[in-house]
Image (cartoon, rainbow, N blue to C red):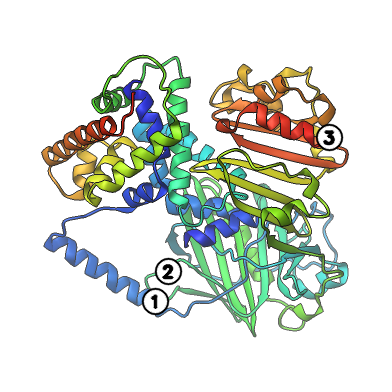
Amino acid sequence: MEDGKIVDLYFERDETAITHTADKYGRSLRSLALGITEDMRTAEECENDTYFKAWNAIPPHDPSEYLFAFLARITRNLALGRLRADSRKKRSAHIAQLSAELEQCIPAPDDTPCRVDERLLREALNRFLGSLSEQKRCVFVRRYWFADSVTAIAARYSISQSKVKSMLWRCRNELRQYLVKEGYDL
Amino acid sequence: MRGQELLDKLEHIAPQYIEEAGTSSRVRRTAGTRVLVAAVCACVVAAAVIVPQYLPPDTPAPPISTPSNPLVDNMVPNPMMSPTYNKVTGYPSPSLYIPGYFTEPLTEQELAVVTPKLCPPYVSYSGIAGFDGEGKLIKVQLSVPIQGGNSVAISLAKGSVMRDYMLPGEPTVTPCNGVDFALYEVAFAADDIRLEATAVVDGCAFLFETTATEDTLKAVKKSFELVLTCFTEYDEGKPNLDAVIPEEIPEWFDRKLTLGEAKNDADFGNYIPSLPHGFVLENARRYKDYRNDYLSVLWCRGLEDVTWRVRRYTEADAVRLTSVEDTKNYDMSLYSIPLAETVPEQLLGIVQDPLFQAKDLTLDVVKARLFNGHYTFSVKYGDIVVQVNAAADVGAEWIYEQLTALQK
């Protein structure tokens, strides 16, 4: 079913909207949550919570043009929230690895909370992503937004793991240089 | 700033990049893959020649009648079928949007002409009729309880039956008393099995649905088949759907508005606040049907959003009404993710969307509602309820100012 029709069902408060959403995107959302939380049960809870939040958010949100992005953002947020909230566990090694990689993009990393205007930073990140080739952009987003492993990205795009690592390394350097050039005192 | 913080801030990258990466892939096709793809294409082409059949959309199941005493007139049917279930993996999705859709319970007279003369023992039929906004009958939905607390939902409509998953060829048909049923066994979750049956009799389409688990499948199938057998026995050969007419067509509309039009709405416009700083209007909607009547406005800034929905207070809201002294009902600093584990079950509903009297609202109360990046709560002004769902960016002070201004 097309995204627009699924969103129409949400607008009509038709509970089958959830079923259609789960049919079309459930696996991807669960996979996204699993990549972050590394726990299937938690991932399933994040997936279900995503449907609940989507149900409450549509309407008035009308994500007909970007339903997957809308849902995935909720899932990512929930999964990262779960990871932080769960003080009984150590922080996910995978997320720690991603954080460490991204730290290489920050000109002067420190423990001070970021004071830059979030909106401006967001726009800068989007401009940076827009400047990349489609494949580089997808690899970057798969790694740092979807929290995919290098192996999974290599399999997804039928390229070698070393090429993925190389692309990510270049992207991180380019992002760092871009942020410096844009004058972000991070 | 550390890497973790940048990882968080990446959350707000443009949706098109997420969609792009979410759907992109490049799979190297080997010779074996090509053969497989060709085989799948052949199956799809074969399935596509099946004439699609349509039945109007699903609606919430009607209430199941309390099992009554054995009905004297009910004859126990003799199952006369050797059922063959077509196995399907996946979940059917038969919903369509019907503008102005509404339902009414069937009257006794209507029930009498749409139900068959046979009924499984110790039960009775109940049902609703669904109409479009013009009062045209879309479908009749009956319900009959069966073993194990389940029920069979039976949809009747003029026309034909919709199947939106495809089978690799025509379904095997199970004949019974002159009616050809197509039976389906659909596995759609780990431990849930959906049984369906379709038939078309003289221009009237039947869709039967129930659910079972691996443990109950055998017993449920037996009851399900008994119900199917009953529906082969109509006095007039088929249900008389022409006799089902709406008592009253409820008013309905769905209008997209400008902000000016929203503020001028006679019912709820006075409760729409000024534009949050830096946000732009994405959607203003005035909606009314037989169940809902509201005005909602959504402002966005990137993926940040503020939703303001205004509607009338209903009796159902009473359970969410809370005093500001009762902090356990609304103070989100007392709870953490996942709410299902940290909030007592009996408080879950009120904690997720508490309703405050406007006169009681304070800035601290608004601040206490910040959770997971959003403020979510409702405020009651006389018989009006304002539901707020706002991103943290907009600030508790702005929300409080707008809500208190509405009292003046």
The chain identifier of the residue carrying mark 2 reads: B
Judging by the rendered image, the residue that carries numbered circle 3 is B407
Q: Which mark is residue B166?
A: 2
Which residue sits at x=60%, y=54%?
Answer: A10
Comes first in the chain, label 3 or label 2: 2
* Residue A164 percent location from the top left of the image: 17, 40
CA gap, disc 3 to disc 2?
57 Å
Residue A35, percent across and down?
34, 34
> Badge 1, how many Cα within 10 Å: few under 14, some, many 20+?
some
Relative to the observer, which residue lies in front, B99 or B405? B405
Amino acid found under the numbered disc labelled 2: Met
Q: Quadrant of residue B370?
A: top right
Label 1 marks a residue whose chain is B
Q: Which residue is mark 1?
A: B48
Give the answer, above or below, for where B320 lies relative to B59: above
Element on which disc 1 rests? helix
Classify the position of the C terminus of chain B by image quarter.
Answer: top right
Foreground residue among B398 and B120 = B398
Residues marked 1 and 3, same chain = yes
Q: Nearer the viewer, mark 3 or mark 2?
A: 3
Quadrant location, the N terminus of chain B: top left
> Is any atom of residue A33 visible in this view?
no
Residue A185 lies in quadrant: top left
Share a chain, discs 1 and 2?
yes
Q: Which mark is residue B162?
A: none
Is the C-beta separation of discs 1 and 2 under 8 Å? yes
Label 2 neighbourhood size at 10 Å, few (<14), some (14-19), many (20+)? some
What's under tag 3, amino acid-wise?
A: Gln
Q: Nearer the viewer, residue B32 or B360?
A: B360
Secondary structure at numbered mark 2? loop
